[in-house]
Amino acid sequence: MEIGVFAHVDPASAFSFAIALPTLDLQRQWGRCNLLANYVAEYVAYQFPQREWAENLISTVTNEFLEAIALLAPAQSELFIRCFQLPETLELELEHRVEAELVDLYMAFLAELADSLQEAHYFALLTATERPAVAFNQFGLAMLVHDFSARIAARLDPQTKRICVRVSLPTREITG
Amino acid sequence: MKYAGQTYTLNYDPLDQQINFDGIFRLAGDDEVANVFAYLTTIHDAVQGTLRLSFRRLRYINAEGMRTLSLFVAFARGRNSLQLLKVVASGVLAWSVKLLPNLSNLWERVEFSVYDHNFYESQQLIEDTAFIPLLRNQTRVLWPHERALMQHHGLKRGMRVADICCGCGDVPLLIARELKPSFVVGVDHSEAAVSYARTLQAEFGVHNSEFQRGDATALMLDDHSFDFVSCRLSLQIFSRPEQILRELMRITRPGGRIYVTGEDYDLIVAHPEEAAIRHTYERTAALAAELGIDLRNGRKLYGMLNDARLEAIRVDQLVVDTSNTPREDFAAMVEQWRNFATFSVGSSLKLNDQERDQLLAGYAAHLRTIERPNGYTTWTTMVCSGQKPLAHRAE
Ligand SMILES: C[S@@+](CC[C@H](N)C(=O)[O-])C[C@H]1O[C@@H](n2cnc3c(N)ncnc32)[C@H](O)[C@@H]1O
C-alpha cells in the first residue's frame, strides 16, 4: 500500500546518511528523540551554507517524527533513519514497524497529510485542549506539512506492518 | 519569577513585562504542559497592558510546546484583560519564524514580530557581501598591531575565546592560528559573513574554531563559558550597545576578560591636505550618524565597560599610521572606506551628485597624502578591556 510519491534516489550520486537503532531507546528515554533529532540535524545541515537555519529546520522536522514513532512502534523493533539530498529536496526517510492496532489510523492520517490537510483540521489540532484519544503526535506531523512545506509519502507492507515514511523538504525552505 | 524545566527556563522580567523562553522547549507529558500553562497564566494575571513572549533564545520547540502556547492564547483571549500579546521570534531560528505566526490567527491581539528583521538602521549595508573587502582590508592593517594588544589585554594560550560580531571571521582565525587558544567561536548575524568565514577556515585549515550565525543580543552560547570575549569595531552600529555588553558579560567566566574596540574619526590626522581630509571624515561621521552608526564611539567604550561594572579596565590607543603600516595597505583600506561612504551609505541617504563628488574629492586627497613619500596619516582605534568580577552572579 502506497501513499504519495517517492522521489527517485540514486544512492551513488546523492549525499546520504543512515542510522539504525532500537525504538525502545526512544520509548524508554523520551528525551532521546530530542538528542537524536539534533544529532541528525547537525550532521546533515553541515553541508549547507545556511547551516543554522538548515539545522534548526531539520531538527524540528526529525523530532516530530521521532516523537510520533516513539508512540507508534512496537517496543521490540528497529528504526532506520535515512536522509538523502536531491537537487530540489532533502528527503528524510523513516522505516519501522507500527503497532497492529494503530496501522489503519496512522495510514489514514498520513493519507490526509499527503493529500491535502485542511486548514481547519490543523487549527483544531493546534488548539486542542487535550491530545487525541489515540495519540501519535498528530499535531506535530500536521505542523510539518502546514508550516514547513513538507511533502509526505508512505509505503506499508501490510504483512509485516513495516512502514517507510518519506518526508520531502524543499531545498528553498532549508536555505532560508 | 522563573520556571525551569529539564531543558528550558521561562523567566519573567517585570521591567519589560516579558517572559523569556530559553533552551529547548520540547514538552513531554500532560503534567509538564499543565505546569507550564499554570506558570504562564499566573504571570498573565499579574500583568496589565502588553505582555511579551520572547523566543529569541529558544533553540527548539515541539508540537506539545506549540499547543501549550495556543492554550495560553486561548486563556488570554478568554480573560480579555491584555491589550496586546507580543510574540517575538528570532530570524536565525527557523522554527520560530515558521510556527509562531500561527498564534496571531488565534486572537487579534497577538502581534508577531521578528526581532532581528531590520533591527538596526544600517543592517542591509553591513550584512552585504560588498562589506567584506572593507573588513578584510581593515584587518590587514590592524592585526600586526592588535595581535600583541590582545595578549596585553589578557588573551593567553589555551583560553576559550569568543569573538562576537566577528564579521568575515578573519580575526578569530588569526587568533586561532597565532595565539594558540584552545577554542575560538565567531558569531555574526550576517549570513554572507559567516559563510565567508567558514570558507576561510577551510582554507586556513584551522580546526579549533567554529562559526555561528547568531544574534549578539541573544547569543546561543552558555553562561560563563569563555575566558576572553571580544567584540571588535561593532558596538558603534547599535542604538543600544549595552544590550550586547550584557550578553558578552553573561558568556564570560567570572575573572575572564571582555575586550571591545571602536573607532574615533576625530583621531584621523593627516598632512598635507589636512583641511580637506578632516572635513571628509567629519562629513562621513555625520552621514553614518544618520544611519545610526557612531564613528566616534571609541571614546565611549571606557564608560560603557565601567557602567557594566567591569574591573581592572585597561585602555589603549591602537594607532596605525603610514610609518608603521605599508602605504599600499593603508590606501586599499581608505579606498574601501570611500566606496562604502559614497556609494553604500551615499545611495542609502540619496546624496546628490555634488555631495557625492565632494566626498570623493576628500577621499582622493587622503589617498594622495598616503601615496606621497612625505605624507603622513593615522587611523586610531580605541582598545578597551575589563575583567568580569569574580563575584559576578548571572541574573
Ligand atoms: C563593522 S562590522 C565588524 C566586524 C568584525 N568585528 C571586524 O572588525 O572585522 C560589524 C559586524 O557586526 C555584525 N552584526 C550586526 N548586528 C549583529 C547582531 N545582532 N549579532 C551579531 N552580529 C551582528 C554585522 O553583520 C557585521 O559583520
Image: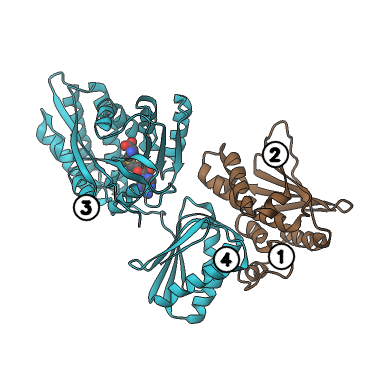
Chain colours: A brown, B cyan
What is the chain letter for disc 2? Answer: A
What is the chain letter for disc 3? Answer: B
The reply to whether the residue tagged 2 has its Cβ within 8 angstroms of ligand 1 is no
Type of amino acid at the residue the image marks with label 4:
Glu
What is the chain letter for disc 4? Answer: B
Residue labelled with disc 3: B307
The tally of labels here is 4
Judge if badges 4 and 2 mark residues of a common chain: no
Residue A158 seen by the camera: yes
Q: Secondary structure at mark 1?
A: loop
Judge if badges 3 and 1 mark residues of a common chain: no
In the depicted view, which residue is nearer to us: A18 or B371?
Answer: A18
Judge if badges 3 and 4 mark residues of a common chain: yes
Is label 4 in contact with label 2 (beta carbons under 8 Å)? no
Residue B334 seen by the camera: no
Type of amino acid at the residue the image marks with label 2:
Ala
Distance from label 3 to label 4 (Cα)?
Answer: 40 Å
What is the chain letter for disc 1? Answer: A
Residue labelled with disc 1: A135
Residue labelled with disc 2: A18
Mark 4, mark 2: which one is toward the viewer? 4
Q: Secondary structure at mark 4?
A: helix
